Image (cartoon, rainbow, N blue to C red):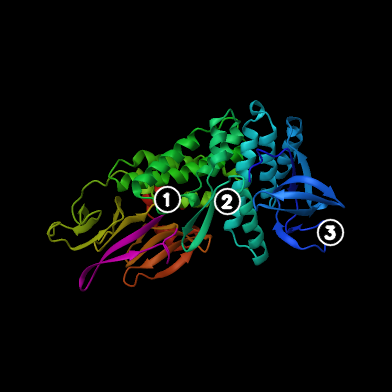
Amino acid sequence: MSLIALGLVAIVTQDSAALRSAPRESAQQQAVLWQGDTLEVRGERMGYLQVYDHRRERGGYIAAAAVREQSLEPKDAPSLMAVVRFLRDTPGEESLGIAYTAAYIKAAPAEAIDAEAFDALGTMADRLARRASGKLSKNDDAIVAAHLEVVASYGVTIQSYEHEGRMQLCYNGEAFRRVLAMNSSEEQRERAALALTRAECVDPNLVPLDRNNLDQWRAETLDRVKLADLPEYEKNRLHIRRAAVWSSIAFEKARSHQNAQDAANRAIAELAAVNKEELAEADNTDYTEAAVRAAASRWAAESQPAPHSGLAITTAPGESGQTCVSLTDAKHDAKKPLAQRCTYGVVWNASTAINPHQSAVTLAVQPLDTWRELWVFHQNEQGWTIDILPPGDNPDLGYLEFAGWVPGTNKMLAAREVRVDGHFKRSFEMIDLTSMETEKRAADPRSLSVFYRWQDPMWKKGTLSLR
């Protein structure tokens, strides 16, 4: 519904308010109205307002206690903005707040409308979308669905994407784009940039080129916010988001056979810039997610290993989009390798680790920007075999990386960090190379004596698992 032609309106303030055919409670119910619905006022009788609902194209009566009458004259704009300021940060009142914001934009002179109104509109629309994406009771689900219909009537677009079998709702960000284009404060620009660059609101069906262009835009949007005047905890939020975005850019560059070193270094530097002493409790999960994303692509920051005698990993193009990985030695070249396997993932040659007995080799392979696996080449009585060790059961967000060899044994040390059912789990493990089973694990490497003693110095220097 548009407020353009309306001079006096009634804004519904209660959910499940009844629009009735006559001014009495016993009259037939014409429709159910929700917070934020705006009605044209045409009269008043016996404690009821006679109204017309342009959205439903239906007239009727509604109890005066269920609405607030509001004039849309320019002199009323300050009082409307006062209500917007009150509702902006009130959870559950998003549709009502958006209705008042629309009324303010209608009432205020064009030259008086600044970034504050659009900042409030975007904040409430974004919060409503995130609330609609969460777990709701049956009753709350019906209320949120109704609120989504209300805000849609004001031109607020909520998009939906499917991620791992569930729907993610996201505000399309039009108001936040206006904030960035206006003379806004850094706090307003920060809120806009963070809302526009949420990873869960990236369309999973984007082709690689479009995804790469989007991530470049996300990085540029975040860089437009100046950190100097922001509180420390808000600086942290920008560093966290930048780390996540640049880690994706590093992966995309590597997949396109471009130099990804600068992008990976930027991701690691942004993560290191987070002031943990000023990290808000609400941001702990985002910080961990950014760290895992950066860790998944961290090998892009490393140089290729120097060639050496003995076992070696070589790569060559395979079928369209594939990279074929070969294990070679002095007697077996890439034409007759000891073992070979092809993948559509990014192969990080710099991660190659060979045990002292030349009987096992590990290699990091990254099929997704948020998922890095560990390939283990190992020798047995039948020859060389390749085992792929993923971070977890379902590709989501995680990595598993080599952390050292245990001398005199057929054991390997590894670090694992993965998101399972929305929660992050980090462990340091000793894995048997014969069965590929984890024999020992601990949440802290100092709690696992074999790990603490034999962890690889190069792993310790470069890993993000010890942050």
Across and down, in percent, residue 169 comes to 54, 54
The image quarter containing residue 343 is bottom left
Q: Main secondary structure of the magenta part?
A: strand
Find residue 284 and name its label.
Answer: 2
Q: CA distance from mark 3 to mark 1?
A: 65 Å
**Three-letter code, disc 2:** Asn
Circle 3 Cα neighbour tier, 10 Å, few/some/many (<14 / 14–19 / ≥20): some
Q: Which mark is residue 295?
A: 1
* Secondary structure found at label 1: helix
Q: Counting other residues with Cα less than 10 Å from the Cα at mark 1, is it few (<14), some (14-19), or many (20 or more)? A: many
Which residue in the protein does label 3 denote?
24
Q: CA distance from mark 1 to mark 2?
A: 16 Å
**Mark 1–mark 2 contact, CB under 8 Å?**
no
| Comes first in the chain, label 3 or label 2 | 3
Magenta span includes 124: no
Mark closer to the chain start, 1 or 2: 2
Decide: is 454 above or below 290: below
Residue 383 seen? yes
Residue 447 seen: no
Which sits in the foreground, 356 or 372? 372
Residue 450 place in picture, x, y as percent: 42, 63
- Please determine whether, in this image, residue 276 is positioned above or below residue 182: below
Instruction: Provide the secondary structure element on which disc 3 rests.
Output: loop
Q: Report the side of 357 relative to 134 (left or right).
A: left
The residue at 42%/70% (across/down) is: 439
